[in-house]
């Protein structure tokens, strides 16, 4: 049986079959991986304590096919301590990866950015900056690099964004987000110091991610509403 040892973070877990749980990891070597672990006596209390989000892990998996068995798990570093909206932001990053990433596809840069994001959230770096940076890398890893060139070449104050077409001059009023041209230019140049620019960036990323999710809501966003 093939065995894999990888650096990993647990993204999500849920009951599977009797005395089993299904675990979803993001790993440095093979991207998102699903694995099964047994509950009960075979899952020692220290092992259960390790299988929590935001803990850098070393895992050994065994088995062939897409669904592996978790043979061993041990801590690689101390867990990142997140509280309040920083905790909910961590859940948001986890849910994005669970919902949008394919399995067994290496996402080297995304894994590094995820770990860097957790570190920043634990240090209470401004949330909007952390989330936008992660979302940008996520979209790039999914092959969705945003082309901002029209906002520099088209002489128009506002734009609409269509995932299939990109930025289109906002000539007619439509029932969708309308983006300020100057804000988009600042985003393209990574000048994110203005609150107005960051708000535009947030709306743009939400539109794109909602499109990728086919309009299905994210559970983690509800946490921000319930606990403002």
Image (cartoon, rainbow, N blue to C red):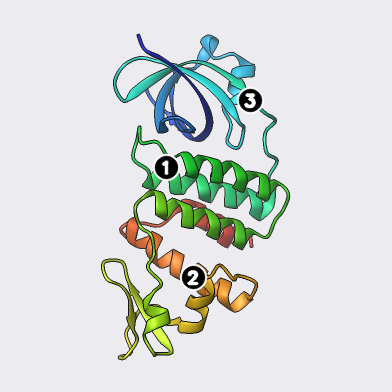
Q: Could you classify mark 3 by the number of other residues whose Cα lies within 10 Å: few (under 14), some (14-19), or many (20 or more)?
A: some
Secondary structure found at label 1: helix
From the image, state whether disc 3 or disc 1 is nearer to you: 3
> Residue 139's mark?
none
N-term mark: 2 or 1 = 1
Residue carrying label 2 = 188
Quadrant location of residue 116? top right
**Quadrant showing the C terminus:** bottom right
Residue carrying label 1 = 98
Residue placed most toward the observer, 136 or 123: 136
Extreme right residue here?
Answer: 123
Secondary structure found at label 3: loop
Residue 34, image x, y percentages: 39, 29
Secondary structure found at label 2: helix
Q: Residue at x 41, y 55 (%)?
A: 139
Residue 112, image x, y percentages: 55, 41
User: Distance from label 3 to label 1 (Cα)?
Assistant: 22 Å
From the image, state whether disc 2 or disc 3 is nearer to you: 2
- The answer, for residue 134, to whether it is visible in the render is yes
Residue carrying label 3 = 76
Q: Residue at x 48, y 56 (%)?
A: 135
Residue 179, image x, y percentages: 44, 80
N-term mark: 3 or 1 = 3
Marks 3 and 1 close (CB-CB < 8 Å): no
In the rendered image of this protein, does residue 193 appear above or below residue 91?
A: below
Residue placed most toward the observer, 108 or 75: 108
Residue 78 shown left or right of residue 4 in the figure: right
């Amino acid at each position: 049986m093939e065995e894999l040892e990888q650096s990993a973070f647990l993204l999500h877990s849920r009951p599977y079959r009797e005395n089993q749980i299904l675990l979803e990891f993001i790993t440095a070597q093979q991207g998102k991986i699903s694995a099964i672990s047994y509950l009960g006596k075979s899952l020692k209390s220290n092992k259960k304590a390790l299988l929590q989000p935001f803990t850098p892990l070393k895992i050994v998996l065994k088995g062939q096919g897409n669904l592996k068995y978790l043979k061993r798990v041990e801590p690689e570093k101390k867990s990142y301590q997140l509280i309040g909206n920083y905790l909910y932001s961590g859940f948001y990053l986890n849910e994005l990866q669970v919902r949008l990433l394919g399995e067994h596809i290496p996402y080297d840069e995304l894994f590094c950015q995820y770990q860097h994001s957790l570190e920043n959230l634990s240090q209470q770096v401004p949330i909007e900056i952390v989330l936008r940076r992660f979302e940008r890398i996520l979209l790039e890893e999914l092959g969705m690099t945003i082309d901002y060139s029209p906002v520099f070449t088209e002489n128009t104050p506002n734009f609409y964004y269509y995932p299939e077409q990109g930025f289109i001059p906002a000539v007619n009023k439509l029932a969708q987000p309308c983006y300020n041209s100057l804000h988009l230019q600042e985003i393209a140049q990574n000048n994110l110091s203005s609150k107005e620019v960051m708000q535009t960036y947030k709306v743009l990323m939400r539109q794109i991610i909602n499109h990728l999710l086919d309009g299905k809501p994210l559970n983690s966003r509800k946490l921000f509403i319930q606990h403002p």
